[in-house]
Amino acid sequence: MIVVRTGILLLSLALVLSGCVISRGRIGNPIDEENLRRIEKGVTHRTQVVELLGAPDRINQAPDRDIFQYYYYDAKSPALILLVFNLLTLNAKSDNLYIFLDKQGVVQDVIYGKRTDRVDFSLRPWGS
Amino acid sequence: MTVRPSRVLNAALLGILVLSVLGCAVRRVEFNEPITAEHLRFIRLGQTTLQQVVERLGPPEDITMEADQLIAEFRWSTTRSASLNLGYLFRLISPVSPTFTLSGTGINIEHVQFLCDKRLTVQAYAFGKADEHAIIEFWPF
């Protein structure tokens, strides 16, 4: 009896999950928030920034300052692939960190925001 | 044995429903959350800082500098794609189905730019002109 029930349960599960696809993609590395907290405006030097966070993904140079940019992208994609009908959604979000350095290489400002903690696996190809 | 007309009608409706979704695919790709004018109501030009904007909206995708000014650009997009493979209809009468697909894709990329001074205080902001493509668009012509 247990074997039959287990068989029915597995078959039901296989039927329910049939055609489901779940995938995830990332670009870059998550920004290390613990190390980010060690960066102090007016104190930390560019070499220390690189030691703490690694080389920036991008450097924006202006006459009187540089901006180090670090980014991280996270995407989750659920899909339902049926015999005759397919639905797919891909939700992607980004984190970005900008560190403003003066010409002496000292941190002047830090702009950081995180969105990737809100990426979800919801399958909703319709809607606005 | 007699067949009730209501059963025939139900079967026909079911058949039409099945045929209407044969070979259909609907896809959607979202990047970041949309920002609307409503989201920016808290901004006081000359007072609100870029950091305060980031706390509410998340980080900008790009920052560029020009002399004493800085432009922070926030971007988001929704891409919708739908396709209809009419070749699936041949599966009803043939073991092999040819491919004949009509497909449409609409990419809506939107952005808002903030102009800030050297102290990173918002001086002005403006939305880019947005495209509005249909949710489901099979017809490519």
Image (tube, coloured by chain):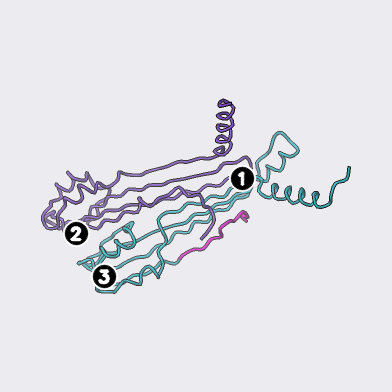
Q: Residue at x 29, y 68 (%)?
A: B115
> Label 1's element?
strand
Q: Earlier in the sequence, mark 2 or mark 1?
A: 1
Above or below for A37 versus A5: below
Residue B48 marker: 3
B134 on left or right of A44: right
Residue position for label 1: A85
Badge 3 and badge 1 in a common chain? no
Q: Is residue A33 left or right of residue A40?
A: right
The residue labelled by disc 2 is A109
- Secondary structure found at label 2: strand
Chain (cyan): B
Q: Which residues are magenta?
A: B130-141
Extreme-right residue of the structure: B1
Q: Percent from the top left, x then y, of residue A120?
A: 42, 49
Residue B11 is inside the magenta segment? no
Report the chain holding disc 2: A
